[in-house]
Amino acid sequence: MEIRGKLIHLLAPQTGEGKNGPWKKQDFVIETDGQYPKKACLTIWGDKHNETFLTIGNEIVVSFDVESREYNGRWYTDLKAWKIELASGMEDAAPAPNYKSSGPVQPTSPAPEFTVSAGGDSDDLPF
């Protein structure tokens, strides 16, 4: 999956030691554009990112996987980023569709315009 937004918060990096050796992760929050902006906290593990991209205010495109797991009867969901790119210069590129099409997409005609008149017109509707 892919999400585009502005980096608004960068949480402190976390490190630890696991059975497979040391690990490192970085959480960050982005906010999408649009009429109803959404915020999403994503995690990137290891050294898979260019730290210069993770600057507050940068417009970035994040490729990520969604993973949920159950622990003691509760479900937890992670958004694991695997690629981060700066969004600059991507305005000219056509967005890739997120679906598989069975053929060419036909353009739709605009919706018909309806007008409401204040009385005098007879119509066939009973109400």
Image (cartoon, rainbow, N blue to C red):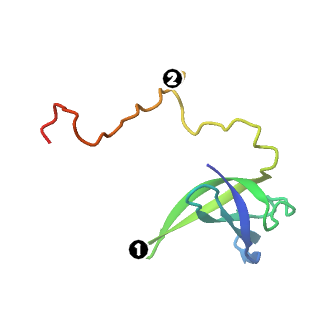
Query: Residue 82's x, y, as percent?
Result: 71, 54
109 w.r.t. 50: above or below: above
Query: Residue 61's x, y, as percent?
Result: 72, 52
Label 1 and label 2: CA atoms lie apart by 47 Å
Q: Residue at x 77, y 50 (%)?
A: 87
Q: Residues within 10 Å of mark 2 (few under 14, many from 20)?
A: few
Q: Residue at x 87, y 62 (%)?
A: 52
Task: Answer with the quarter of the image where residue 96 lies.
Answer: top right
Mark sitting on residue 61: none
Q: Which residue is mark 1?
A: 73
Q: Nearer the viewer, residue 97 or 74?
A: 97
85 w.r.t. 30: above or below: above
Q: Residue at x 81, y 49 (%)?
A: 88
Q: Amino acid at mark 2?
A: Gln
Q: Secondary structure at mark 1?
A: loop
Task: Answer with the quarter of the image where residue 25 lies.
Answer: bottom right
Q: Which residue is mark 2?
A: 106
